[in-house]
Image (tube, grey):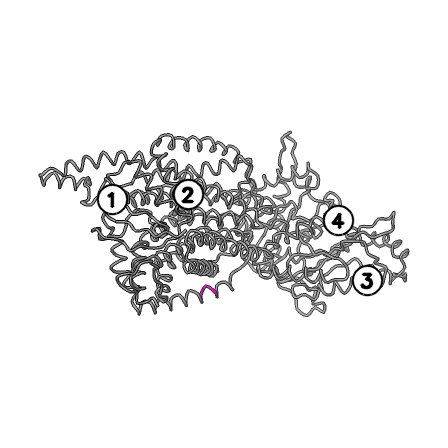
């Protein structure tokens, strides 16, 4: 409903409408523009307040109730926080930092492929272990040995490698029953015994009869591509695929343990834990010459990731102190009557109670607590105090002569739309994030969105009660100062002024110097024609750099970034990438249903499928291994008809006795005479970057889908590669949905189409800028940065909606004057809002973990670009459009910009 409201600015406080409230959305401290307070009549304006009016009335009533019973509303939230906070006793129980579960997409294709592989080809690590046939990473300890000399393949270096091998194998561990066991009693086994950590260890002395990448030992071939690195091969060999190995700079020793049986899995876990504790000291004692040793286990990534949470806990106290300090300084006034230092400090405590309540409630409800959620308190401290500052601002606009109940009612009525739209946009942006395919993002969004709701609840109850109690003290100080100022003694007046106990002549606050700066200096400077030209060029450069950066951004999370910067995991990954990136995963290709392999057409289809995969850029056909191709040669050699079903099936057993490794690759049902499934292997090469991983997986799956034979490609690493196929789509989906929701909220609370258009423009521009500059700051597009891009939307609304609506609501006569007035009202609050949020997360910049530093980096970009749009770009762009205020009555002057 449109209402034309005409009020006297002198007789009573003006009715606060949506335009004025939204001007104040980030006016945290409460300094208002210095205005002429002489009696005058404001021009009537048409407002659409179908939401604002009932909401303000509801808040006014709530304010009266809070003012009447302040102690009730102060103590109830505290007691509620104490009760819900007891949910933290479930913290350890709810912690689920499983990397695969949290950082890989829900329902990723590789997880289904793994289930099929495990169904068709179950492993047996106590009798027939094979590394390339593992369907998981396995349970292992790994040593990566790098030499500073020319080669490890020397007598002295090899002797040191063997000593390292002995140290690992002789590591003894006792279980709960006191039974001692070592690697030899837990090793994964083949028919010939424990699997070798490296095939080269079969040689007591390194000779010159070594070949690469395949090495034959006792009529059995071993693939060295992933175990020997930094190689120098002999020249002149006729077989270019397998050449003489002359030198090697790096060697990997991998000690696989049994894990199929539950008892073996438990003991292997104990042995690996003991290895991580006892081997590093032993390594320091070893007097190694020209050798550097890096270690890693199948437990390392998970344990190091879980340790990140403990490291960031002390930083929370730092942020809490900084926010309290900032709040106190921001709310300090020379006039102690209107100073709200301790009220602001209590507002920060209120945000802390919200964290306690929100987290405690969700822990009670069984919502998983993951490492990414540890970022949430830092953000909540920075953002959750927004409503507090808005309410302080509204309180400071009330008349000192009114009762506490009336002042609280006016405060609530004025702040209603501001705190509601801020809460709605932020909370909705987070709840939209629950749509993502990553559980780590879902958990963060649930915890943060819910806690922000508690921030809102506690601000309108607990903090409002504190404001009411402080008002009673303010009444006493006002009465005292007023009585003393009636004294004719100028000495008394001077003393009171020095003590900060004085009442301004008109009972209202003095203008802040920052408002004066924006009104007299910055605003006129920004609206200068040459400044506008510079801003347009600056924005063109910003947009160009952002778009270029978007095409350079890397996708997916690097697993080394899940560990602490000082972790032993990081150098291991770095050395592995440096010396072992030539050969990628050895990929299994398996048939998902029974087919007639003895049929010539079927075999041709099978062969064509294999050739299509081998022709891919990331596959080297030389290193492929197919049981069917070998079987065809075998039957041809013994002159058997391969096209005969009986012949084909009857000769399988003799064939598998000779080529025993293939026994693991064929599933035969002898009772019905069918081959249920089979698999073969292809070797990937030159997969050294995330882009390579993404392209390889996408292309191989596409080729497999086009094969006439139903086949699936799989490797355990594909579980993590799956993130590349969904991360971009998920990000675009979440951003689009959240942006649409923000636009709807803007239209509801700010019913001006032009304003909504600028809100949409700012959201898109800030998101493009943040995404583009991520690549310049070495931040990948992953589940962690996705969280921040969702946050982008809420902050884009906060910075843009209010400044653009302040412009269209201005009564000024020209576009430049409109911009100056908008900056006068909102320039300082925007700076304060940006500063508060950055202070809330700045402690994370000192963290030694990627997931926390990334959070800070993107939040910094979001705030800086959002503030730049609110203070620089949007004000200038708005001056290019002649927008006038709509009035029912004829105005004294005609706006020259209006047609």
- Mark toward the start of the polypeptide (3 vs 4): 4
- Mark toward the start of the polypeptide (2 vs 4): 4
Res 776 seen here: no
Camera-nearest residue between 684 and 223: 684
SS for tag 4?
Answer: loop
Is 547 a magenta residue? yes
Pointer 1: residues within 10 angstroms few (<14), some, or many (20+)? some
Is 625 a magenta residue? no
SS for tag 2?
Answer: helix
Classify 91 as above or below 378. Answer: above
Camera-nearest residue between 346 and 52: 52
The residue labelled by disc 2 is 315
Which image quarter: residue 332?
A: top left
Q: CA distance from mark 2 to mark 4?
A: 48 Å
User: Which is the main secondary structure of the residues drawn in magenta?
Assistant: helix
- Which of pointers 4 and 1 indicates the residue nearer the eye? 1
The residue labelled by disc 4 is 121
- Mark toward the start of the polypeptide (3 vs 1): 1
The residue labelled by disc 1 is 333
Q: CA distance from mark 4 to mark 1?
A: 74 Å
Q: CA distance from mark 3 to mark 1?
A: 86 Å
| x, y percent for residue 96 | 56, 41
- Which of pointers 2 and 1 indicates the residue nearer the eye? 1
Q: CA distance from mark 3 to mark 4?
A: 21 Å
User: In which quadrant will I find the C terminus?
Assistant: bottom left
- Mark toward the start of the polypeptide (2 vs 1): 2
Q: Which mark is residue 603?
A: 3
Label 2 with label 3: CB-CB less than 8 Å: no
Which span of residues is magenta-colored? 544-548
| x, y percent for residue 597 | 83, 58
Q: CA distance from mark 2 to mark 1?
A: 30 Å
């Amino acid at each position: 409903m449109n209402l034309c409201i005409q009020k006297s600015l002198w007789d009573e406080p003006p009715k606060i409408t949506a335009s004025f409230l939204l001007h104040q959305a980030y006016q945290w401290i409460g300094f208002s523009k210095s205005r002429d307070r002489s009696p005058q009549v404001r021009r009537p304006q048409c407002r659409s307040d179908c939401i604002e009016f009932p909401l303000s009335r509801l808040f006014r009533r709530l304010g009266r109730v809070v003012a009447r019973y302040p102690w009730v509303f102060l103590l109830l939230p505290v007691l509620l926080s104490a009760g819900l906070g007891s949910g933290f006793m479930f913290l350890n129980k709810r912690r689920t930092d499983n990397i695969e579960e949290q950082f890989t997409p829900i329902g990723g294709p590789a997880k289904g492929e793994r289930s099929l592989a495990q169904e068709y080809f179950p492993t047996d690590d106590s009798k027939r272990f094979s590394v390339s046939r593992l369907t998981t990473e396995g349970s292992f300890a790994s040593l990566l040995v790098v030499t500073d000399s020319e080669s490890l393949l020397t007598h002295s270096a090899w002797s040191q490698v063997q000593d390292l091998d002995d140290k690992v194998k002789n590591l003894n561990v006792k279980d709960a029953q006191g039974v001692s066991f070592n690697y030899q009693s837990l090793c994964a086994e083949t028919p010939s015994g424990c699997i070798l950590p490296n095939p080269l260890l079969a040689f007591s002395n390194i000779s010159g009869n070594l070949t690469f990448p395949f090495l034959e030992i006792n009529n059995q071939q071993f693939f060295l591509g992933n175990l020997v690195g930094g190689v120098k091969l002999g020249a002149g060999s006729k077989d270019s695929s397998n050449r003489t190995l002359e030198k090697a700079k790096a060697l990997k020793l991998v000690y696989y343990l049994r894990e199929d049986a539950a008892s073996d899995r438990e003991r292997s876990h104990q042995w690996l834990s003991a290895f991580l504790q006892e081997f590093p000291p032993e390594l320091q004692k070893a007097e190694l010459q020209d050798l550097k040793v890096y270690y890693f286990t199948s437990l390392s990534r998970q344990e190091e990731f879980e340790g990140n949470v403990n490291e960031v806990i002390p930083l929370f106290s730092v942020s809490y102190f900084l926010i309290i300090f900032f709040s106190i300084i921001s709310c300090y006034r020379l006039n102690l009557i209107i100073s709200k230092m301790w009220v602001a400090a209590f507002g920060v405590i209120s945000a802390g109670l919200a964290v306690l309540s929100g987290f405690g409630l969700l822990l009670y409800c069984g919502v998983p607590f993951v490492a990414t959620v540890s970022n949430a308190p830092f953000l909540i401290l920075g953002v959750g105090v927004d409503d507090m500052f808005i309410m302080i601002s509204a309180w400071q606009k009330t008349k000192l002569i009114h009762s506490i109940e009336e002042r609280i009612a006016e405060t609530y009525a004025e702040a209603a739309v501001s705190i509601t739209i801020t809460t709605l946009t932020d909370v909705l942006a987070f709840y939209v994030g629950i749509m993502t395919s990553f559980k780590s993002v879902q958990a963060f969004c649930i915890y943060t969105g819910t806690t922000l709701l508690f921030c809102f609840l506690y601000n309108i109850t607990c903090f409002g009660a504190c404001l009411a109690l402080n008002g009673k003290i303010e009444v006493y100080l006002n009465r005292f100062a007023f009585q003393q100022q009636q004294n004719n003694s100028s000495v008394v007046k001077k003393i009171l002024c020095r003590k900060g106990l004085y009442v301004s002549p008109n009972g209202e606050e003095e203008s802040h110097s920052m408002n004066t700066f924006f009104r007299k200096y910055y605003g006129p400077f920004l609206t200068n024609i040459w400044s506008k030209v510079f801003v347009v060029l600056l924005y063109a450069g910003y947009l160009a750099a952002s778009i270029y950066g978007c095409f350079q951004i890397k996708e997916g999370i690097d697993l080394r970034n899940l560990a602490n910067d000082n972790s032993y995991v990081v150098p291991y990954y770095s050395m592995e990438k440096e010396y072992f990136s030539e050969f990628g995963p050895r990929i299994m290709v398996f048939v998902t249903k029974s087919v007639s392999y003895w049929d010539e057409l079927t075999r041709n289809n099978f062969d064509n499928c294999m050739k299509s995969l081998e022709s891919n850029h990331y596959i080297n056909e030389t290193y492929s291994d197919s049981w069917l191709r070998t079987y065809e040669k075998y039957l041809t050699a013994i002159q058997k008809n391969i096209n005969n079903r009986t012949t084909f099936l009857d000769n399988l057993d003799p064939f598998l006795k000779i080529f025993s490794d293939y026994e693991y690759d064929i599933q035969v049902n002898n009772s019905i005479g069918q081959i249920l499934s089979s698999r073969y292997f292809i070797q990937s090469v030159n997969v050294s970057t995330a882009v390579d991983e993404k392209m390889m997986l996408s292309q191989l799956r596409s080729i497999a889908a086009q094969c006439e034979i139903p086949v699936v490609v799989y490797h355990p690493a594909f579980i993590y590669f799956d993130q590349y196929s969904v991360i971009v789509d998920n990000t675009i989906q979440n951003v689009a949905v959240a942006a649409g929701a923000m636009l709807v909220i803007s239209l509801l609370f700010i019913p001006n189409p032009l304003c909504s258009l600028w809100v949409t423009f700012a959201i898109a521009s800030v998101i493009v800028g943040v995404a583009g500059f991520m690549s310049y700051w070495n931040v990948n597009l992953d589940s962690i940065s996705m969280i921040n891009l969702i946050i982008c939307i809420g902050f884009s609304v906060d910075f843009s909606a209010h400044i653009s609506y302040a412009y269209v609501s201005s009564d000024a006569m020209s576009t430049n004057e409109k911009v100056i007035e908008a900056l006068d009202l909102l320039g300082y609050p925007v700076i304060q809002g940006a500063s508060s949020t950055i202070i809330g997360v700045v402690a994370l910049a000192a963290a030694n973990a990627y997931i926390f530093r990334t959070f800070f980096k993107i939040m910094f970009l979001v705030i800086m670009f959002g503030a730049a749009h609110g203070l620089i770009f949007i004000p200038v762009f708005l001056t290019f459009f002649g927008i006038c205020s709509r009035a029912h009555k004829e105005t004294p002057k005609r706006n020259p910009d209006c047609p």
